[in-house]
Image (cartoon, rainbow, N blue to C red):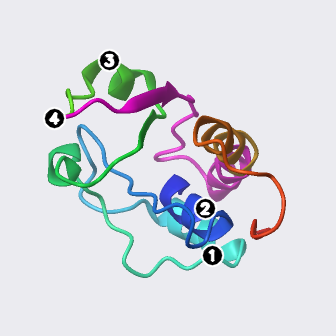
Amino acid sequence: MGEAILNHVFAGRVRAISAGTQPQPKVADGAIEALRLAGLPTDGLHPKDVTSVMDEDIALVVSVCDNARETCPVFPRPVHRIHVPFHDPHGEPLASFVAVRDDIRLRLVAAVREALDLPETAHVRPM
């Protein structure tokens, strides 16, 4: 959900790529539905292993669960890192995904804005 939300809010100023240390076989149905309910596009969202993005030009790594924080690999070049933990609603009802989506919108967007020193003014698109 973070990838879709960040790409929407920072449209063209930030390119978010979500990847995990142990990704699920598919994006959770609850995550897709929570994003759709907010009017966010879900086409092309799919789980990625962090090793598949190692060669990308990455300015910031954000870990969102404690397990990923501990097992995140070393990137081939120095990269700024922050940790913004979220509850994992996997296997829970849609309401849990919606709550996490809203928490991501509130806390992750602010953390990325601060870490990348992005202004809070124009060009930020609401959900």
Say which residue label 3 marks. Answer: 70
Q: Which mark is residue 5?
A: 2
Disc 1 on helix, strand or loop? loop
Disc 3 on helix, strand or loop? helix
Image quadrant in which you'd find residue 122: bottom right
Q: CA distance from mark 3 to mark 1?
A: 30 Å
Residue 22 rendering spot, x and y as whole percentages: 23, 40
Task: Identify the residue at image location x=55%, y=46%.
Answer: 92
Mark before the other along the chain sequence, 1 or 2: 2
Task: Identify the residue at image location x=34%, y=28%.
Answer: 68
**Tag 3: amino acid:** Glu
Q: CA distance from mark 4 to mark 2?
A: 27 Å
Q: Is residue 115 above or below residue 49?
A: above
Say which residue label 4 marks. Answer: 76
Disc 2 on helix, strand or loop? helix
Check residue 89 for magenta coloring: yes
Query: Could you classify mark 4 by the number of other residues whose Cα lies within 10 Å: few (under 14), some (14-19), or many (20 or more)?
Result: few
Q: Which residues are magenta?
A: 76-104
Q: Are marks 1 and 2 in contact (CB under 8 Å)?
A: yes
Residue 67 rendering spot, x and y as whole percentages: 35, 23
